[in-house]
Amino acid sequence: MSETPVKQQNTTAFYGQAIASFALALTAVSVGIYSLDASGWIRAFLAISVLYLTTSAFTLSKVIRDRQEAGQIVSRVDQARLEKILADHDPFKPVV
């Protein structure tokens, strides 16, 4: 009577769209910084800022994913414990 949760998997098109969107955004920002009418130091600062923001976004998404996966594992353990208790319980067993 245990239900196995359906594992959600993303399609190849979803991954492709995410990669294309990321590449397009990074390219647009890079072109914008390159064509900016400012000194080299300002453009370098903006480029480093974009790289820092990008790596921070990747780290944040990894932390959120890890927390969600840890919650799923705890939920599975709790579900297994509950199923064991329910399987061991016999309501028709005579009390001694």
Image (spheres, rainbow, N blue to C red):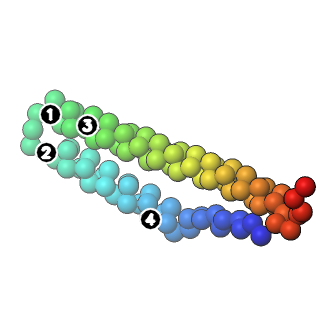
Secondary structure of the residue carrying tag 2 is loop
Residue type at mark 3: give it: Ser
Residue type at mark 2: give it: Leu
Contact? badges 1 and 2 (CB < 8 Å): yes
Secondary structure of the residue carrying tag 3 is helix
Q: N-terminal of the two: label 4 or label 1? A: 4
Residue 60, above or below 18: above
Residue type at mark 1: give it: Ile
- Label disc, if present, on residue 36 of the rendered structure: 2
Asked if one can make out residue 77 in the rendered structure from this viewpoint, the answer is yes
In front here: 57 or 32? 57
Kindly identify which residue carries mark 1. Answer: 42
Kindly identify which residue carries mark 4. Answer: 17
* Left or right of residue 21, residue 75 in this image: right
Residue sitting at 83 percent across and 57 percent down? Answer: 88
Residue sitting at 41 percent across and 43 percent down? Answer: 60
Q: N-terminal of the two: label 3 or label 1? A: 1
Q: N-terminal of the two: label 2 or label 3? A: 2
In front here: 69 or 39? 69
Secondary structure of the residue carrying tag 1 is helix
- Find residue 46 and report its horizontal and vertical position in percent: 21, 38
* Left or right of residue 3, residue 26 in this image: left
* Left or right of residue 22, residue 46 in this image: left
- Find residue 3 and report its horizontal and vertical position in percent: 71, 68
Q: N-terminal of the two: label 4 or label 2? A: 4
In front here: 67 or 21? 67
Kindly identify which residue carries mark 3. Answer: 49
